[in-house]
Amino acid sequence: TCLGPAGENHERSNQDQHELPIEQSHQPQQDGHEASHAGTRLFVGTLQPEKKPTLSEFAEGWSLGLYRDPVMVAVSTGGESPLLARAIRRWIEELLPRGLGKIAIVAGRVRRRMRSGMTLAERRKRFAFLFDRAKLVSWSNESRAIIARRMNATISRAGSEPIGGKVFLVGAGPGRAELLTLRALEVLQQADVVLHDRLVPQEILETARKDADFVDVGKRAGRHKGVQARIFSLMLEYARAGKIVVRLKGGDAFVFGRGGEELQHLKAHGIGYEVVPGITAALGCAAYAGIPLTHRDHAQSLTLTTGHLAGADENTLVVPRGAQGHGNRQTLVLYMGVGQAARIRERLLAKGMASDTPVALVVDGTLDSQRVLYGDLSVLPALAAQVPEASPGLFIIGNVAALGESLAWFGRKQAFELAA
């Protein structure tokens, strides 16, 4: 793909060009493409060996470019801000391994060899996770022969996945898109189907592959059983159809996310899977509220618990043993407790926790709309009453909660005051 300014005719040859093994798609993001965002143009692709550009040809119409023979990236701001183009180029330079050209050449050879006797769907399946960043960095310093050997081994393993498809259980983190892990981003950009929770923000969904199917499988209060059965069914249905399925959950899938149950279901039906951890709400919300969950002067233990249990009575409150007054030097983090604040207060008081134990309630944690409400155990229900129905809230209970009022660095914080 010969790269240049927008509007030029970029000729391609499927047989001759050294091309990354990305299958043809109706989406403009696949193969060589130009993307336009707020006036900044970025073109990424590979070059036909007989059309390698001179420096002047490469620069014509573009502010700055990055060349990893035969891979080229060019950036332009249309002359509006050369310094911005230079900064973007520097960021791309930091991301792309030096040996990327060798990898592209080997990949092209492997792709051409696989065209015969293999369907497009099978090729996509085998190539789907060939180019995660960890592999690119690892392979970039190797010889072409070693790259080819490792690439072929990776493709062979991909071809042996059970029942065609694969499910990735991915933690989306506490809500802010930049808190996604690199692996989560890689998986989302390869997904055929994304089964996502209700609270996963649109900003995170937009990082996924643009032509993926998005299915909202979010649960609402009091309506869990039927939804979970549907999730089980959809995971099997899509995986058996050979799809790459991302089960996208808020926070971390293994912390009050029913991830263990979903893996057991996949295992029982012979479906391949991988788990991608995410930042759980307790860690993300506490960090963005400026509340250290442990502190040598205030808390030497940390308990994460939830407002309900599975079973006939889903409103059963779980209260840890030893949850008693200021002297216990522990932090209690309560997930899914806003709707049961009154019962939580009574249970904790009954267990011996002091009524003036500091409390912070983090609402919309890590998002621009984040609010942190401060008070103590005695006013827990009044704090919860300020949370909009659609917003997630997390209780942090213990001496460390009070530190947020002085250490807060993000969003809005407001101290709760009882009405006169």
Image (tube, rainbow, N blue to C red):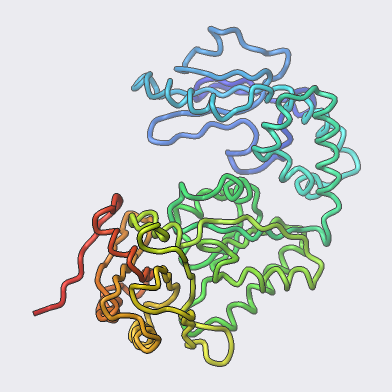
* Left or right of 150 on screen, residue 202: left
**In x, y percent, where is residue 84?**
38, 24
In this rendering, is residue 171 above or below 91? Answer: below
Q: Which corner quadrant of the image does residue 388 belong to?
A: bottom left
In this rendering, is residue 360 above or below 81? Answer: below
Q: Nearer the viewer, residue 168 or 240?
A: 168
* Left or right of 241 on screen, residue 398: left
Q: Which corner quadrant of the image does residue 420 belong to?
A: bottom left
* Left or right of 123 on screen, residue 224: left
- Quarter holding the N terminus is top right
Q: Which corner quadrant of the image does residue 134 belong to?
A: top right
Q: Residue at x 32, y 67 (%)?
A: 399
**In x, y percent, where is residue 195?**
59, 64
**What residue occupies the far bottom of the structure in this picture?**
312
In this rendering, is residue 96 above or below 315? Answer: above
Q: Residue at x 59, y 48 (%)?
A: 209
**In x, y percent, where is residue 69?**
67, 18
**In x, y percent, where is residue 167?**
70, 60
* Left or right of 324 on screen, residue 154: right
In this rendering, is residue 7 above or below 191? Answer: above
Q: Residue at x 85, y 37 (%)?
A: 152
